[in-house]
Amino acid sequence: MFAVSAFTTAIPQPALEEPMVQLLAPDGTRTPHEEFDAVLAAGADGAAPAFDDPERLRGYYRDMVMVRAADLEATSLQRQGQLGLWASALGQEAAQIGAGHASRPQDYLVPTYREHGIAWARGIEPMTLLEMYRGISHCGWDPYALRTHPYMIVLGAQAPHAVGYAMGLQRDGVVGTGDPDTDTAVLALFGDGASSEGEVSESFTFAASFQAPVVFFTQNNQWAISVPTSVQSRVPLAQRSRGWGIPSIRVDGNDVLAVLAAVRTAMDEARAGKGPRFVEAVTYRMAAHTTSDDATRYRTGEEEQQWADRDPILRLRRHLEQLGEIDEGFVTRCEQDAHDLAMRLHHHIHGMADPDPVSIFENVYAEPHPLVEAEREEYLAHVVQFEDETEETQER
Amino acid sequence: MSTSSLPIAKAITAGLRDAMRADEKVLIMGEDVGVLGGVFRVTDGLHAEFGAQRVVDTPLAEAGIVGTAVGLAVRGYRPVVEIQFDGFVFPAYNQITTQVAKMHYRTGGRVRLPMVIRIPHGGGIGAVEHHSESPEALFAHTPGLRILAPSTAQDAYWMTRQAIECDDPVILLEPKRRYWLKGDVDTETRPDLDPWTAQIRRPGRDLTLLAWGPSVPLALECAEAAAEEGNDLEVIDARSLAPLDMATIAESVIRTGRLVIVHEAPVHGGLGAEIAARIQAECFYHLEAPIGRVGGWHTPYPPARVEHAYLPDLDRVLDAVDAALEH
């Protein structure tokens, strides 16, 4: 077996003493980490700036500010009745921006339904996510163009898809070639709640048996609607994969550098043909489960305040201030850009047309299907009865 | 010479082999399909010819098997999944209904899943529990899936190839009690008839007897027995359960005026109910008698020693035929 220092299959005794890697403390101070410092310094294959180069750090800050602004606007739009529902990722920006930026363009990402920061990093317009939550479509982007799987609502069902895709990569010969632009891996994301689903365990089995190039990334945001992580697992989630022999690590999910370094390491090892990895990112779902949820029924304001002090955006800002690498001008520009984004979303949603109901019958099958075609005709024959009435109404 | 006499199981083997030779993206995956060649030997020889990357012995986890097949299909492969026995498809039911069936639709047609799920199905083999199920209605009720049920070796060969070539997900129900039923198979001449069309196996005038998969030989046997009593039955092999070829069935019933449907699955809520409902709607004034359905009872599949009382047999089908003829 090869040596992995940060990733391990060992389980500490007692289990609750599982270490959590943190490079940026909540107060913004930087802790050295020999292995991950080197990963961050290497940047995008040495030629580009280091991952912790101040220009990049400001980029992550801006990304997180934009993602949060879109998220807050979406919540606001839901309250205005413009979205049926919104699942906020508030508080999870670092976990998602870090993981997104750790991935290479050729990698394939497999999200759940709250990965709005991942979507941002992959170039999926926030507008597209809003379309889903407004009820315009089930998936607004092309998974092939953006190399990102559709959002998943049947929790955990995406995990086997991720492993299967990784098995496909093995057969395509794009694993372990040594060329960083060719070697490809899959990043499979799911939450603490989803980690209890049987299909997640089956994914570990397939990933381990076939040593598939897949990195499982769990954002432990402490709550699955109203159920705390302690009900999903009596041991730190990072330890789960070790029963399958899949090396894992636990990182502070509100620390964009720790997430970036850990996911980059894991993805590079998977790409190199070293097999699957698992990363637990400890974070917090600062908002309720969705806009239909009332978090006051099961958690305290004190807890929320404790986590607010560990806010990922605040943390990075403090760090940049300590480095002397951020000024009011930059912050103001970010806030302005965020405001502009929110306004664009606002206007886009208000102008968003519903799809034609006849589109219900499209794409049920790839090949012609007589029943769908017959029912489409039946539906059209039904609505044509009302056409005269509609015209009358419009004339009035 | 491209025509040979093959048992249904071997016709499927040939279909899989020829499909894999024709397209390197075709993979086979499932429990025991590789080294063992499958518990029914349907994948016998394929591991030796195509290797472990294309004929994959998977862990024992049906949801994982179907789910990883989805991922492989997204990556551009054409996986052929084997579910070892009908009763074990249920751990994969979530993946099949919520994921496989819906992927093309929910991605606006951008993601296709050209995968095949092969399921040996049906009873009458003296097996232990969960090895004799007929779950077709549970899948036919799910939009986005196609279901084929070959009853002959020729259909078994070509439906295997056509299911693999189809860009939609196809469930291939293999009639395991008929695995060793031999028939002529022409592997070179692509049939004119597409797999989604029903076929009249025995033309007749007095009554339409509709069956599929393992029940087709029973239906033909009934027609022979009925002929001895002067009744001329038209036997239709449905062949495709999703979509149903209602045009062929309706045309037949319009001529004969009477319909009896036979399937191993329970009558209550079975696919025969859908067919009967459509025929009464489309052929109402042509019917001379109520539509009869013969099948399993609304009970779990019983222990093997009494399965003969559960499965439709010659007597029960002839009773239904007589009732329709005498109406």
Image: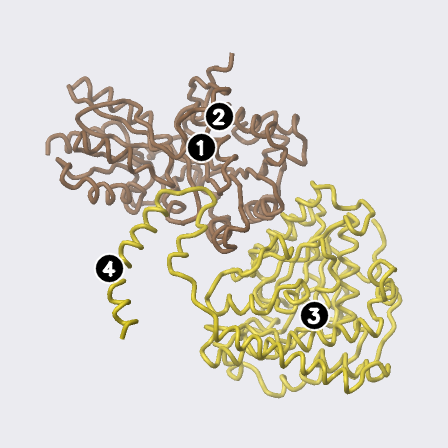
Q: Point out the residue furthest to the top here.
A: B1
Q: Residues within 10 Å of mark 2 (few under 14, many from 20)?
A: many
Chain A tint in image: yellow
- In the image shown, does A100 or B318 lie closer to the viewer? A100
Whole-angstrom CA distance, mark 1 to mark 4, is 45 Å
Same chain for marks 1 and 4?
no
Provide residue B87's location: percent of width, then percent of height: 45, 42
Of marks 1 and 4, the one in the foreground:
4
Q: Quadrant of residue A190?
A: bottom right
Residue at 60% x, 32% y is B23
Residue at 33% x, 28% y is B199
Element at badge 2? helix
Mark 1–mark 2 CB contact (< 8 Å): yes
Q: Which mark is residue A95?
A: 3
- The mark that comes first in sequence, 4 or 3, is 3
* Chain that is brown in the image: B
The answer for which chain carries disc 4 is A
Circle 4 sits on which residue? A385
Same chain for marks 4 and 3?
yes
Circle 2 sits on which residue? B9
Residue at 18% x, 17% y is B228
